[in-house]
Amino acid sequence: MRLLLIEDEKELAGLVREGLIQQGYDVDIAYTLADARCYLTSSDYDLIISDRTMPDGDSLELIRDLTSRNKVTQVLILSGCASYEDRVAGLNSGADDYLIKPFAMIELSARIRNLLRRSVGLRGYQLRAGNIVIDLTYNTVMVDEQLCKMTRRETVLLEALMRRMGRLVTKESLEKNMYGLDDEGSSGAIDIAMFRLRKTLKAHGANVQIHTMRGLGYVLEEPNDETQT
């Protein structure tokens, strides 16, 4: 799952990002509200984690804007603004949770999982294709109800394909999902990652097929489909 962290304290942002990546999340960092708006324009996120006091304003303005546009992305405010009035203002702006700094990473992780579970009615917390199930809350992949060990990149690619089952997923879209907006992928990296994903799925007995649309991208098909690679 993809998260956007809005935090101007670079050291803290780096530590939080690293901790969340270790749990299987993909995390982009915005150091200003202007950067956050650019990220939100070009990508979709399952959860936003935002400090309040940013160099270019209060993030509540951004949250109100998302709420007014009926954005379903969950928002967790992570802030040193700890008064009762601050917390009420944050929740009234449209945020779904409010965690005060300093905080324990274990609590942040628990709150993230809780918010993602809450969004079940909006987007579902599991993706299914053939005999594969991805649990989006815990970032696990099961094949025939058996745990399938995958690298983070393999899981990210599989999730992107499963979200658009039967439809073309372009290489450009996969690059954004796999590397995020702060990273750069080498030439041919997607092809290599897809090769490894296919190999992992085959080794675990997955019955879906990933078809290559040359020069365009990939399509994930349910079993028994007659489409040819």
Image: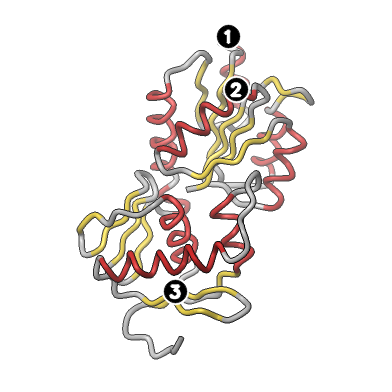
What is the three-letter code of the residue carrying label 1? Ser
* Label 2 SS: helix
Q: Nearer the viewer, mark 2 or mark 1?
A: 2
User: Among all residues in the image, which is located at the extreme top?
Assistant: 83
- Say which amino acid is labelled 3: Leu
**Foreground disc of the pair 3, 1:** 3
| Whole-number angstrom distance, CA of label 2 to CA of label 3 | 39 Å
Cα distance in 3D space between marks 2 and 1: 25 Å
**Looking at numbered disc 2 in the image, what kind of residue is underneath it?**
Glu
- CA–CA distance between discs 3 and 1? 49 Å
Q: Residue at x 66, y 41 (%)?
A: 66
Among the 4 quarters of the image, the one containing residue 168: bottom right
- At 46% from the left and 67% from the top, the residue drawn is 194
**Which one is in front, 144 or 99?**
144
Q: Residue at x 29, y 75 (%)?
A: 207
Label 1, on which residue?
83
Q: Residues within 10 Å of mark 1 (few under 14, many from 20)?
A: few
Element at badge 1? loop
Residue, disc 3: 220
Which SS class for mark 3?
strand
Residue 55 x, y percent position in the rendering: 76, 23
> In the rendering, at what x and y percent does residue 90 appear?
60, 23
Contact between marks 2 and 1 (CB within 8 A): the answer is no
Q: Is residue 196 above or below residue 56?
A: below
| Marked residue nearer the N-terminal end (3 or 1) | 1
Of residues 130 and 13, the one nearer the viewer is 13
Q: Quadrant of residue 82?
A: top right
Q: Name the residue beneath numbered marker 2.
A: 11
Q: Is residue 167 above or below residue 149?
A: below
Q: Give the vertical position of 229 relative to 105 (above or below).
A: below
